[in-house]
Image (cartoon, rainbow, N blue to C red):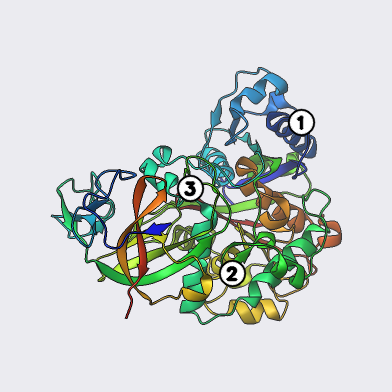
């Protein structure tokens, strides 16, 4: 994975529409239920807590805290279409200010440099040539 | 005992593992024939059936091999909980009084390697699978990582759990993995999803199990050793639980479906967790057994490490868990896996488990399955 610094806007084809907003730095787009206030990611058709279909899109904060993580060390089967040859990548859940925890790839794949509680920021990465997705990387002190 | 209580009067299995040249359906038919023999009945006596398979076709087509008797045969599909779902449906059918005698069957034959992901089939965007996040192995590793952190537990206990599974599998003629492995060998195997190594995981495999269920008050006309199904409890997830295939989680944590299914099973049976003498619980990997021990209520969160280190979960310990080797030694043919647990509990309650028999004539057995996308089924069986 190649982190972009700074991310161009727009950075190129996204793996899917609606996952993040074209801001600098990029911010994930969550759904916030107008009836019960519950957050979801990505923006859903209906709220999983109260069943409401009145959902507003909202930018999440640019930074959060790593809640848990692992490293993916074998190549997943289809529909995985990441860069060849396969290289292990980190995956984790990031807590965005107590609103919602979002799962994403981590720029860091060395388990010795990953820890629960790390401050991370949202960035965009080429997970395969020419196609971008969001990821999380450590906030440099 | 009322007329609508349910008994298991016949059990049959096709061995787990790789059986080249034998289809999943053929393994299912083999298991049904064995269960009918065990109950001393013929297919024409069976009034209804529920069955499931994730990768080996429709279970109801087994009638082509068993006999075209016009019975209602309903297909069940609930991921790793398929077997538990078939059992739930069959038990409820008898408990309702609609029928007296039926079959629950599950079988499968999966290709090598991790399961294929189907994001759209789970209501998720394809991007989730394309970018490499739709893997059950990742989920278990991340849930475990957080669990070990929250309960200040070390990782050594994981190898101990897997070593127990292989040791028990070596005593089971129907298991896939029949060689005992040391904790060092397990720890030294390739890392798959930190902190879990290859030998701590189960693999998709092959196998089949069938059960014959009957009204409890007629059970002794089929067998001299009926096992009674005191409760079956099935749950999906609640908002806020941490489940497989979740692009996001709520910060407001809720109990997993395992917690609610287990509580329901104990409540319905009028049995306490402290009365359980043998348990089969979902061990997709070693950490799953660790976490599920507490989620099922068989122990408290944080108690597992001391119990496992003291050997309490081994055959001969105070709470033997996964006495047939569990998913780790048997592999996971999705349709059959939950029914394998019941098969093992019936053997243990009958006293027929041979070299892996739990001593002291166990009289209460517990089972638990967990599967994507956050479903769980638990049972209590007694003699």
Residue at horizontal 71%, vertical 43%? B9
Q: Quadrant of the C terminus of chain B?
A: bottom right
Answer with left or right where residue B303 lies relative to residue A44: right
Q: Residues within 10 Å of mark 2 (few under 14, many from 20)?
A: many
Q: Which of these two is toward me, B17 or B27? A: B17
Q: State which chain disc 1 sits on.
A: B
Cα distance between the residues tagged 1 and 2: 34 Å
- Disc tally is 3
Secondary structure beneath disc 1?
loop
Q: Tell me which label, 1 or 2, sits earlier in the chain.
A: 1
Q: Residues within 10 Å of mark 3 (few under 14, many from 20)?
A: some
Q: What residue does disc 3 label?
A: A83
Per the rendering, the mark at residue B22 is: 1
Q: Which of these two is toward me, B200 or B222? A: B200
The percent position of residue B259, horizontal first and vertical second, equals 47, 63
Per the rendering, the mark at residue B182 is: none
Secondary structure beneath disc 3?
loop
The percent position of residue B74, horizontal first and vertical second, equals 54, 29
Cα distance between the residues tagged 2 and 3: 35 Å
**Same-subunit check for callouts 2 and 3:** no
Per the rendering, the mark at residue B290 is: 2
**Same-subunit check for callouts 1 and 2:** yes
Say which quarter of the image contains residue B315. Answer: bottom right
Can residue B251 be seen at all in this image of the molecule?
no
The percent position of residue B369, horizontal first and vertical second, equals 57, 54
């Amino acid at each position: 994975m190649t982190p972009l610094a700074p991310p161009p806007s727009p950075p190129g084809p996204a793996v899917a529409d609606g996952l993040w907003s074209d801001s600098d730095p990029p911010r994930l787009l969550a759904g916030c239920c107008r009836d019960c206030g519950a957050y979801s990611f990505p923006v859903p058709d209906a709220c999983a807590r109260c069943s409401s279909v009145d959902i507003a899109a909202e930018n999440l904060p640019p930074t959060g805290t790593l809640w848990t993580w692992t490293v993916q060390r074998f190549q997943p089967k289809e529909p995985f279409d990441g860069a060849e040859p396969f290289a292990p990548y980190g995956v984790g859940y990031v807590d965005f200010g107590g609103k919602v925890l979002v799962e994403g790839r981590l720029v860091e794949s060395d388990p010795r440099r990953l820890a629960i509680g790390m401050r991370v920021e949202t960035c965009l990465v080429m997970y395969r040539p020419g196609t971008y997705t969001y990821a999380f990387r450590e906030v440099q002190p | 005992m009322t007329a609508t209580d349910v008994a298991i009067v016949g059990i049959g299995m096709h061995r787990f593992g790789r059986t080249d040249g034998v289809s999943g359906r053929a393994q299912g038919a083999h298991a049904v024939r064995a269960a009918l023999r065990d109950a001393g009945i013929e297919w024409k006596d069976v009034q209804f059936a529920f069955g499931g398979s994730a990768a080996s076709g429709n279970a109801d087509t087994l009638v082509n091999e068993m006999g075209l008797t016009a019975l209602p045969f309903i297909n069940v599909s609930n991921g790793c909980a398929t077997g538990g779902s078939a059992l739930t449906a069959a038990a409820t059918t008898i408990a309702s009084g609609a029928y007296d005698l039926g079959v629950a069957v599950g079988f499968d034959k999966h290709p090598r390697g991790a399961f294929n992901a189907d994001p759209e089939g789970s209501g998720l965007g394809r991007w989730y699978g394309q970018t490499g996040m739709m893997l059950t192995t990742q989920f278990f590793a991340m849930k475990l990582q957080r669990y070990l952190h929250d309960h200040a537990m070390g990782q050594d206990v994981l190898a101990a759990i897997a070593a127990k599974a292989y040791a028990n599998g070596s005593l089971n003629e129907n298991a896939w993995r029949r060689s005992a492995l040391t904790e060092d060998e397990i720890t030294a195997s390739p890392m798959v999803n930190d902190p879990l190594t290859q030998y701590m995981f189960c693999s998709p495999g092959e196998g089949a199990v069938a059960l014959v269920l009957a009204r409890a008050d007629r059970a002794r006309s089929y067998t001299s050793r009926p096992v009674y199904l005191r409760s079956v409890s099935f749950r999906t997830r609640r908002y806020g639980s941490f489940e497989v295939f979740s692009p996001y989680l709520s910060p407001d944590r809720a109990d997993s479906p395992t917690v609610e299914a287990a509580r329901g099973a104990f409540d319905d049976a009028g049995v306490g967790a402290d009365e359980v003498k043998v348990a089969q619980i979902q061990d997709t990997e070693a950490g799953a057994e660790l976490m599920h021990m507490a989620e099922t209520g068989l122990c408290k969160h944080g108690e597992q490490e001391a119990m496992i280190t003291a050997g309490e979960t081994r055959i001969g310990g105070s709470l033997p868990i996964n006495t047939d080797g569990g998913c780790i030694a048997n592999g996971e043919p999705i349709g059959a896996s939950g029914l394998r647990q019941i098969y093992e509990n019936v053997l243990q309650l009958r006293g027929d488990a041979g070299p892996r028999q739990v001593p002291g004539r166990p009289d209460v057995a517990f089972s638990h399955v967990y599967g994507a996308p956050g479903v769980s089924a638990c049972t209590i069986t007694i003699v």
